[in-house]
């Protein structure tokens, strides 16, 4: 049971949730942390099931955002990428940003060469550092080769544990088994 604007309910989750229903909202809903609670705003007229589903979806999204912020605050990915850039690319790459994201469940990382930005699946935070390093090297290589050509794989395979890391990622289902 969730709390509503009229009173607070005891929740199994450590953070209380206050639900505010508004006649001004037609279809949008939102959730935000305010003080020590989560405030969920919903349109009036949702069924109990629709409310539960919406609240669950919003709380999951809020949890993912918080996890992303915490991971990026704890892990110094920019320093790690800089070190790997020096070691494997002679320090010649220019990276504008690197961060963990929570919306990559099938990929372990992605790179946008045009903006020199790298995004890493937050699932990597639980894996050994040598696996994370491999993924960073893989994504850094895309700054030079924006494809999976032989030239790209030559760059990636300079990482001494590349084959081992690929095997690890294949085993946990995060990487394709073929090299295109």
Image (cartoon, rainbow, N blue to C red):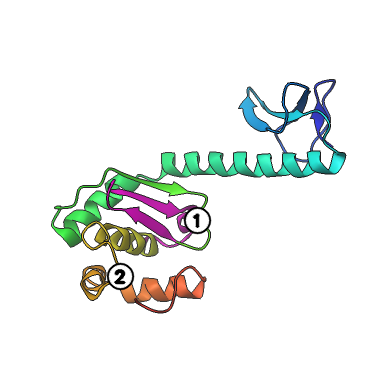
Identify the image quadrant of the C terminus: bottom left
| Side of 48 relative to 40 (left or right) | right
Counting from the top left corner in percent of width and height, residue 7 is at 84, 22
Residue behind mark 2: 148
Task: Please tell me the numbered disc located at residue 19.
Answer: none
Counting from the top left corner in percent of width and height, residue 87 is at 18, 59
Query: Which label's residue is closer to the chain start, 1 or 2?
Result: 1
* Helix, strand or loop under label 2: loop
Crowd rating for badge 1 (residues with CA inside 10 Å; few <14, some 14–19, many 20+): some
Q: Who's the residue at 54% across and 40% down the image?
A: 65
Counting from the top left corner in percent of width and height, residue 136 is at 32, 58
Could you give the CA–CA distance between mark 1 and mark 2, rounded to whole angstroms?
19 Å
Q: Within the magenta stretch, is there residue 115?
A: yes
Identify the image quadrant of the N terminus: top right
Task: Please tell me the numbered disc located at residue 104.
Answer: 1
| Side of 70 relative to 144 (left or right) | right
Q: Within the magenta stretch, is there residue 166?
A: no
Q: Are marks 1 and 2 in contact (CB under 8 Å)?
A: no
**Would you identify the image quadrant in which residue 29 lies?**
top right
Q: Who's the residue at 84% across and 31% down the image?
A: 45
Q: Nearer the viewer, residue 38 or 41?
A: 41
Start-end of magenta stretch: 108-129
């Amino acid at each position: 049971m969730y709390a509503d604007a009229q009173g607070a309910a005891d929740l199994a989750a450590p953070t209380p949730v206050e639900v505010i229903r508004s006649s001004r909202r037609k279809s949008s809903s939102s959730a935000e942390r305010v003080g020590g609670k989560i405030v969920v705003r919903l349109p009036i007229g949702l069924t109990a099931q629709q409310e539960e589903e919406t609240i669950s979806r919003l709380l999951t999204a809020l949890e993912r955002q918080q996890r992303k912020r915490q991971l990026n605050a704890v892990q110094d990915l920019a320093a790690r990428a800089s070190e790997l850039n020096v070691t494997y690319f002679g320090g010649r790459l220019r990276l504008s940003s690197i961060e963990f994201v929570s919306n990559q469940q099938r990929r372990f990382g992605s790179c946008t060469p045009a903006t020199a930005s790298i995004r890493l699946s937050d699932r990597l935070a639980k894996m050994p550092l040598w696996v994370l390093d491999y993924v960073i090297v893989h994504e850094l290589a895309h700054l030079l080769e924006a494809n999976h050509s032989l030239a790209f794989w030559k760059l990636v395979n300079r990482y001494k544990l590349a084959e081992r890391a690929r095997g690890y990622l294949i085993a946990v289902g995060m990487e394709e088994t073929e090299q295109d």
